[in-house]
Amino acid sequence: MPGPNYKNDSKPSASSTSTSAVVPSTSSTPLEVVKVEDDPLNCKKMCAKNTKPFTVFVEGNIGSGKTTFLEHFRRFEDITLLTEPVEEWRNLNGWNLLDLMYKDPPKWAMTFQSYVSLTMLDMHRRPTDTPVKLMERSIFSARYCFVEHMMRNGTLHPAQFAVLDEWFRFINHNIPIAADLIVYLKTSPSIVHERIKKRARSEEQCVPLTYIEELHKLHEDWLINRVHAECPAPVLVLDADLDLSQITEEYKKSEHQILRKAVDVVMSSPNKLSPKKPITTTPIKIVPQMRIL
């Protein structure tokens, strides 16, 4: 979810590690009463629709491997995967807002981020009948990383920033958007910059290393240092500097630690379907680079 302005060439400072986490209270959603004896199958479906799924936000810099991470969990039938709606940003009634924003940030940043907020809100509110939901990014990273970057670097006029920030505050206080876990794919800016060049997404070819470094610092300040924004859930930090051709195996080795609670929800769910592949119950050692904040 980009948001460029490349004026600031400052390098990110070293980040300290925090062990605290803020988990906001969420109101419970009333369940619709259905008689089991009347229609047991329908009861399971209604319970699934009215029960809040275990929700995971997958966060990280551009090119950090978020889509690869989500694809690793596609083998579970009880997990809904929601990838970033990039194609919607590329084609709004024929307009490529992503390309327009990259080519002329001061003119198109406000328009682009407004549409990002709309599409991300749609993902947050999209109903699912599975007990677990994994989302690529969130409305929180849109505000605390990308819109924040645009404001700090002058891409957004203060009045434009005020409108976007007011929209975010309204959504955050009036529409239930809860997370149970944030997975932060922590990467080095130089490594993801090389990945961006290799994947050759046309809109990203103008992205300089300084922009990636600035986004890295904003992610660190939000998810680890906790210096400028609230963190809506506990954070699981993964070292995602591995080559993308190897990182899937790394996720597989550590999947019980990555989504330990989510897997528990899957296995105990009344509407559980048979997994496409068997889930191993062999104990797995904790990866040293991985920690819960």
Image (cartoon, rainbow, N blue to C red):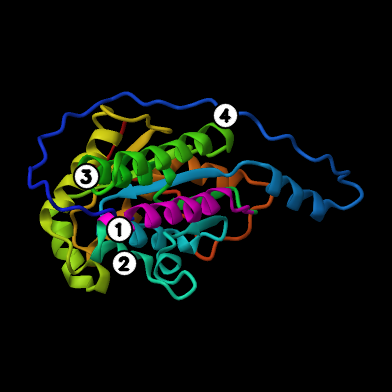
Q: Can you tell which quarter of the image residue 230 is in?
A: top left
Q: Amino acid at mark 3?
A: Gly
Residue at 42% x, 54% y: name it.
116
Q: Is residue 246 magenta?
A: no
Q: Earlier in the sequence, mark 1 or mark 2?
A: 2
* Residues tagged 4 and 3 counted as in contact (Cβ below 8 A): no
Q: What's the magenta region?
A: 106-128
| Image quadrant containing the N terminus | bottom left
Residue 85: image x %, image y %?
Answer: 44, 62
Task: Name the residue that disc number 2 marks.
Answer: 100
Disc 3/disc 2 C-alpha distance (Å)? 17 Å
From the viewer's perspective, tell me whether residue 270 is left or right of residue 162. right
Residue 74 in the image: above or below residue 269: below
Disc 4/disc 3 C-alpha distance (Å)? 35 Å
Residue 149 in the image: above or below residue 106: above
Q: Amino acid at mark 1?
A: Lys
Q: Is residue 123 magenta?
A: yes
- Image disc number at residue 154: 3
Q: Name the chief secondary structure element in magenta.
A: helix
Q: Secondary structure at mark 1?
A: helix
Residue 123: image x %, image y %?
Answer: 52, 53
Task: Name the residue that disc number 1 marks.
Answer: 107
| Image quadrant containing the C terminus | top left
Residue at 54% x, 49% y: name it.
132
Q: Earlier in the sequence, mark 2 or mark 4?
A: 4
Q: Amino acid at mark 4?
A: Thr
Residue 247 in sight:
yes
